[in-house]
Amino acid sequence: QAKETGKNKYQLYQSNYDQLTRRLKLENDLQCALERKEFYLVYQPQVDISTGRIVGAEALIRWNHSTMGIIPPDEFIPIAEDIGCITAIGEWVMREACTQNVCWIDLGLTPICVSVNLSARQLQQERFVETVCDILAETNLDPNFLRLEITESMMMQNTAASIRTLHKLRGLGVSLAIDDFGKGYSSLSYLKDFPVNVLKIDRSFIQGMTQNDYDKAIVSSIITLAHNLKIKVVAEGAEMIEEVVCLLHYGCDEVQGYSFSKPMLAEDLGELLRIDDPY
Ligand code: C2E
Ligand code: CA
Ligand code: CA
Ligand code: CA
């Protein structure tokens, strides 16, 4: 018995130790990942439910580590936030996504709106609005085709300054979306105080819809509320056709989820856009 406990304890130490060394390695290697061009973006289509056309895409970062393979953003973004390199990475993401969107437009495809995730640190940067403005000018992207995604937790910090920044961003012509809506400490006052155009319903509600009536009621109420406030609704993480049917009934504007497509490489989305193009 005692021996067993000792062994379990040892395994626990070992696994904590492994986690720690992995974390330290990622911290260390993140510093030069940009320079080494180890990041790339994938794009997940956003589809207009009533027409079935692709109208947007969310840019999602991937890290192809030289020895550890693909590291998911859920693991390395929080580390990049802790050590401060998220601002440089975030700027790279925005520049890359804007450049790519201009490429698609230059191919003569019907323009789509590209969405980019922001982290709290970026929004708090003194020069953030200027940076966005510079990237738009540099890439020559029409601001109507750039959307920035922020989360509720970001809005809870530094509220007055955040609201000012968001108004300036809207002034540039870019649109703003609230990400993961309903997941955190949602406050309806955000919808009133923050100049947002789009609300993305968190996938936990979408995926619960076919199992219980509570999630159905929540989703349909969010859609009605948003529409009354002239805010567009994107449903995140719809995996099943039943969910999409339900969302269509509720008048949801767009879906983004595996039911339509997983995130894909830029060239594959380009191909899909070409096939999808009505002209
Ligand atoms: P998010 O912004 O909520 O992005 C949506 C996530 O849900 C993506 O995971 C996407 O692949 C996944 N997803 C989409 N449809 C489905 C579905 O039908 N089912 C399921 N199970 N999942 C679905 P991903 O790419 O692993 O990104 C995870 C998170 O990492 C993102 O969540 C976002 O918070 C963060 N992230 C990704 N790229 C960036 C970035 O460039 N900058 C920042 N700051 N954060 C990023
Ligand atoms: Ca997002
Ligand atoms: Ca989300
Ligand atoms: Ca998220």
Image (spheres, rainbow, N blue to C red):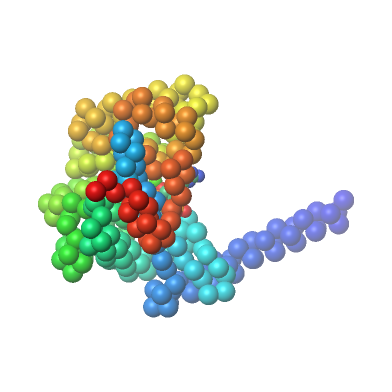
Residue at left offset 13%, top offset 55%: 172
The image shows residue 207 at horizontal and vertical percentages of: 48, 34
Q: Say above or below: 37 vs 251.
A: below
Residue at the front extreme, as displayed: 279
Q: Say above or below: 109 vs 130.
A: above
Residue at left offset 37%, top offset 39%: 255
137 left or right of 185?
Answer: left
The answer to which of 125 and 108 lies nearer the viewer is: 108
The image shows residue 184 at horizontal and vertical percentages of: 40, 40
For the image, the number of numbered tags is: 0
Q: Quadrant of residue 67?
A: bottom right
The image shows residue 35 at horizontal and vertical percentages of: 39, 78
Q: Is residue 45 visible?
A: yes
The answer to which of 14 and 99 lies nearer the viewer is: 99
Residue at left offset 37%, top offset 48%: 45
Q: Say above or below: 84 vs 118.
A: below
The image shows residue 269 at horizontal and vertical percentages of: 37, 56
Residue at left offset 23%, top offset 36%: 231
Q: Quadrant of residue 16?
A: bottom right
Q: Is residue 131 visible?
A: no
